[in-house]
């Protein structure tokens, strides 16, 4: 859904403002946060003409910023309009209420979007598949619905004697809300079909018992580059925020000969809009259903530790709690960008601190062989290898073993069928109970 917020993207001058008191994590470096938002704006081809950090003791309930900051920005925006001949856009690196957004637009006399609106705009520009577009449309409509409050103040608002009859403005709001609700209901129905299809695909994959390994991480952490290196694929991988939106799956052969399905997923980000988390739930279910989760971190980024917390928060939000942390492998990516001292410290840390942490470079391939070996080891711990002998006439059990397990070896004799089969812990327990 391109430009679903009415944003004119091509060569549009953009003012990026980071109010330092507005961010959730006080330990986040304001300069790094401003740089990230500039990257988000550039991701949809906005032309940055001004950027600044504004320190606030607390946000103004009506306009978020102080009067002095608004007056100063208004002068800069007017000068920009006079110079370029086009209206500028102000990107506020925070979450604005509908009233704050409207009042800021009136005070600055230009379009204002907040962090949620900017991320939605990027998703709308990047979604390629039907499923991706549906999910973005749902998130954008949910966001727009909340922006209808008091947005029709240019229309007359008359009151009847009883105090409950609205004027034309009130009726227009209700009309718009009803139209949006109808579109949301339609998209939800279509997404139900998407979820049903995904569930059928997951069932089909379970019949061919290939474990699923999901790559997750902060946006631009290098997931797609790592995905391409491991699977010899050509998924779009750019030094750009949210380069990947639509999930991609490829077969991957591990050193022990076992095949797995590797899934590349959408990147997370701090203050990821709830509208997107809800809308992309059909896609994020691939992470929930994965046998192993590979958390890819950009270890060269100054906010790498905070990014880890952001990813953990989103995982918790979609249902992967701390109790499931033993299914997560942490990959410290981009070691090729570290200086000598940090490189040595990172390598030593990954070798010493945690058996489920490994340092790699998806560009040079360093550590990728060890990562594959770690995946094989972890999956081998989860699955059990059993040697069985069944009767030739026990076709039902033989079919069950082929459906639920991975038959490593089979030898047919006169007295029966000898099998070596690898099963998940749950299926191994069921089999042992039935024998």
Image (cartoon, grey):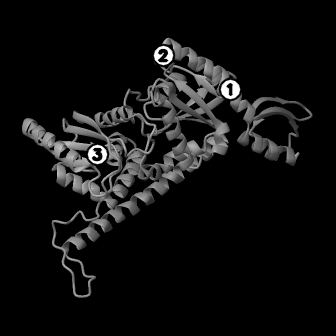
**Quick check: can you spot residue 365?**
no
Q: Earlier in the sequence, mark 3 or mark 2?
A: 3
| Residue position for label 1 | 355
In the rendered image, the quadrant that contains the C terminus is top right
Q: Residue at x 55, y 41 (%)?
A: 312
Q: Position of residue 311 (x, y in %)?
A: 51, 39
Q: Position of residue 167 (x, y in %)?
A: 20, 76
Distance, label 3 to label 2, CA atoms, is: 36 Å
| Residue position for label 3 | 2
**Secondary structure found at label 2:** helix
Q: Residue at x 33, y 43 (%)?
A: 93
For this orientation, the residue located farthest to the front is 57
Distance, label 1 to label 2, CA atoms, is: 21 Å
Q: Earlier in the sequence, mark 3 or mark 1?
A: 3
Q: Position of residue 243 (x, y in %)?
A: 39, 33
**Along the line of sight, the residue nearer the viewer: 291 or 92:** 92
Distance, label 3 to label 1, CA atoms, is: 44 Å
For this orientation, the residue located farthest to the bottom is 161
**Secondary structure found at label 1:** loop
* Disc number lying in front (3 or 1): 1
**Along the line of sight, the residue nearer the viewer: 330 or 352:** 352
* Quarter holding residue 315: top right
Q: Residue at x 10, y 36 (%)?
A: 84
Q: Residue at x 25, y 35 (%)?
A: 51
* Disc number lying in front (3 or 2): 2
| Residue position for label 2 | 336
Q: Is residue 61 above or below residue 54?
A: below
**Quick check: can you spot residue 51?**
yes
């Amino acid at each position: 859904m391109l430009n679903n917020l009415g944003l004119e993207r091509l060569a549009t001058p953009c003012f990026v403002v980071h109010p330092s008191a507005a961010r959730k994590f006080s330990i986040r470096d304001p300069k790094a946060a401003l740089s990230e938002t500039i990257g988000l704006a550039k991701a949809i081809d906005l032309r940055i003409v001004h950027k600044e950090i504004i320190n606030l003791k607390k946000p103004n309930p009506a306009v978020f910023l102080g009067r002095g900051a608004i007056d100063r920005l208004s002068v800069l925006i007017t000068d920009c309009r006079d110079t370029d001949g086009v209206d500028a856009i102000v990107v506020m690196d925070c979450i604005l209420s509908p009233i704050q957004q409207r009042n800021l637009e009136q005070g600055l006399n230009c379009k204002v979007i907040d962090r949620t609106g900017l991320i939605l705009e990027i998703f709308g520009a990047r979604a390629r598949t039907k499923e991706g577009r549906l999910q973005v449309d749902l998130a954008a409509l949910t966001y727009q619905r909340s922006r209808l409050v008091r947005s029709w103040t240019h229309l007359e608002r008359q009151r009847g004697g009883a105090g409950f009859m609205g004027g034309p403005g009130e009726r227009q709001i209700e009309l718009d809300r009803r139209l949006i609700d109808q579109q949301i209901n339609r998209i939800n129905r279509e997404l139900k079909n998407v979820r049903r299809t995904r569930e059928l695909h997951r069932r089909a994959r379970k019949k061919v018992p290939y474990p699923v390994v999901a790559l997750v991480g902060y946006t631009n952490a290098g997931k797609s580059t790592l995905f391409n290196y491991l699977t010899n694929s050509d998924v779009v991988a750019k030094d750009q925020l949210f380069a990947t939106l639509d999930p991609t799956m490829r077969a991957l052969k591990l050193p022990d000969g076992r095949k797995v399905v590797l899934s590349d997923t959408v990147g997370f980000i701090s203050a990821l809009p709830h509208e997107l988390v809800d809308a992309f739930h059909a896609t994020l279910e691939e992470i929930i259903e994965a046998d192993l989760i590979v958390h890819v971190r950009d270890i060269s980024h100054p906010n790498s530790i905070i990014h880890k917390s952001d990813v953990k928060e989103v995982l918790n939000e979609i249902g992967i709690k701390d109790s499931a942390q033993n299914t997560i492998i942490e990959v410290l990516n981009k070691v090729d960008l570290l200086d000598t001292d940090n490189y040595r410290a990172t390598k030593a840390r990954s070798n010493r601190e945690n058996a489920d942490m490994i340092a790699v470079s998806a560009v040079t391939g360093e550590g990728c062989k060890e990562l594959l070996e770690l995946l094989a080891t972890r999956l081998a711990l989860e699955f059990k290898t059993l040697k069985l002998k069944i009767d030739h006439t026990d076709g039902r059990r033989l079919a069950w073993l082929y459906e639920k397990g991975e038959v490593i070896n089979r030898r047919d004799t006169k007295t029966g069928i000898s099998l070596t089969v690898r099963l998940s812990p749950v299926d191994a327990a069921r089999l042992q109970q039935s024998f």
